Image (tube, rainbow, N blue to C red):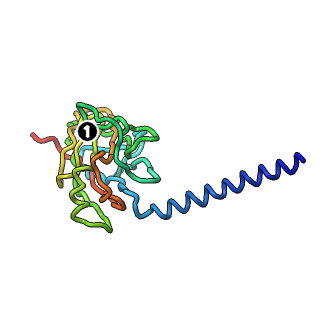
Amino acid sequence: MNHKKTAMTVTTILCAMLFIVIGSCFSAFVYKDQIIKVNDPKLLVIEGISVFNEKGDKTIDKIELSQMKLGLKPATGEEDVETSIPSSITDKQGSEGHYAKFKVYAPSGASVYITNIKLETKGDQAKVQEERKNIFVAIKELGKSVSLEKDKTKLGDFEASDERVTYTFLVWLSAKSSDELKGTNISFDLSIEALAS
């Protein structure tokens, strides 16, 4: 009798696992075209400044963002009064946005800009371009966030330092963003330039 119950329990568990696997594969396939994806930003860096990975042991030419299987969704957290970064956008697993840590060596300081913004979609291109104002980026330590509305936007200034300083890059969607962004592929560069004199 016990063998029958055990066999039935094992069969039930295996069937449930099979349905879960098939269901998740099916939903990933169905929603693949609706995922809002952000490409890893390329770094455009002037001579005399170096950008390193989080450990600081290797120079990099792009920032590797955290992975999000279901892509970006509108942020639900309350916005910080000073930075406008929602509380649900963090540098930890479970963040509603992408994040990445990197180190910068800028002995004379530098300014950092968002440039070369591209939004690729199969939907209405004009409506998607209007949504640029609802896509936000920030370098947490610089204390402000900016939208991708303009073609070139200053994120802030890196202070002069003889050390490799750690920074946290964040990308998220405003709660005001619409479904027009579904299926959009977002790309942009980070341009690190000399401080304006």
Residue 46 is at least partly visible in this image: no
> Between residues 75 and 64, which one lies in front from this camera angle?
75
Residue shown at 28%/51% (left/top)? 177
Residue 137 is at least partly visible in this image: yes
- How many labels, in total? 1
> Between residues 112 and 162, which one lies in front from this camera angle?
112
Residue 191 screen position, x and y as percent: 23, 50
In this view, the residue farthest toward the bottom is 122
In this view, the residue farthest toward the left is 197
132 in relation to 197, above or below: below
Task: Give the side of residue 53 with respect to residue 9, left or right.
Answer: left
Residue 52 screen position, x and y as percent: 36, 43
Residue shown at 45%/53% (left/top)? 70
Residue shown at 83%/48% (left/top)? 5
Mark 1 crowd level (few <14, some 14–19, many ≥20, 10 Å Cα)? many
Residue 28 screen position, x and y as percent: 50, 60
Residue 171 screen position, x and y as percent: 32, 46
> Between residues 44 and 101, which one lies in front from this camera angle?
101
Q: Which residue is mark 1?
A: 106
156 in relation to 188, above or below: above
Residue shown at 23%/54% (left/top)? 132
Quarter of the figure with the C terminus: top left
Mark 1: secondary structure: loop
> Between residues 98 and 40, which one lies in front from this camera angle?
98
Task: Give the side of residue 115 with respect to residue 99, left or right.
Answer: left
27 in relation to 65, above or below: below
User: Three-letter amino acid code at disc 1?
Assistant: Ala
